Amino acid sequence: MSRAAEYDRLLCALKQGGYRVTGPRRALLRLLTEAREPLSVQEMCSAVNDGRDPAEDVAAAGGDDAVNVVTVYRFANLLVDLGLARRVEFGQGYYRYECEEPQDGPHHHHLVCRRCGRVEDFHGCDLAPLTSRLEAEHDFRVESHQLELYGTCGACREGVNG
């Protein structure tokens, strides 16, 4: 699904749920759908306030008021509660948020650099044999999973990241 289609899907879901779609919410949705990695509340707040998101979305909020951390936090958690985003935690002491894939969307996991904290998505995993075995052995129905692999990115190994 294209990023524009993903943005439209999330926007439509909010409207159908009866939620207001304000300028800051549009800017945050656009940011989340265009992000290449999960974002923290602080990263989202900074990105929207620094104008890295479309100006008309922030301006539509009704002026030059900055989007505050509480607004971002509440909206990110609303998206999680609605099943439109997911909250991930990589052992760094805070959550990051990313759009939840639609049921027919590409499934992905994360590579996490322990030195610089960089997170990179990777697609595909062949866990079906493992989950089938676990379901049979433990009388358990696996409904979803998350997989994070921790290590060191190439830039950190080469000393580029300090």
Image: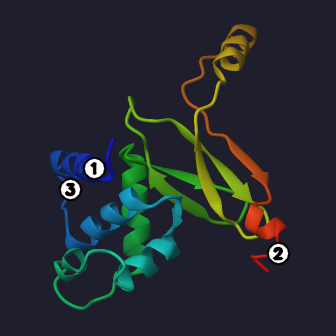
- Depth order, front residue of 1/135: 1
Residue at mark 1 to residue at mark 2: CA–CA distance: 39 Å
Q: Is residue 18 above or below residue 145?
A: below
Name the residue: 51% across, 76% down. Answer: 42
The disc at residue 145 is none
Label 1 neighbourhood size at 10 Å, few (<14), some (14-19), many (20+)? many
Classify residue 115 as left or right of residue 99: right
The disc at residue 159 is 2
Q: Quadrant of residue 27?
A: bottom left
Q: Nearer the viewer, mark 3 or mark 1?
A: 1
Q: Residue furthest top?
A: 136
Q: Quadrant of residue 28?
A: bottom left
Name the residue: 25% across, 65% down. Answer: 26
Name the residue: 19% across, 62% down. Answer: 21
Marks 1,2: beta carbons within 8 A: no
The disc at residue 19 is 3
Q: Nearer the viewer, mark 3 or mark 2?
A: 2
Classify residue 91 as left or right of residue 30: right
Label 3: which secondary element: loop
The mark that comes first in sequence, 3 or 2, is 3
Where's the N terminus, which quadrant? top left
Residue assigned mark 1: 10
The mark that comes first in sequence, 1 or 2, is 1
Name the residue: 44% across, 68% down. Answer: 73
Marks 3,1: beta carbons within 8 A: no
Label 1: which secondary element: helix
**Amino acid type, label 1:** Leu
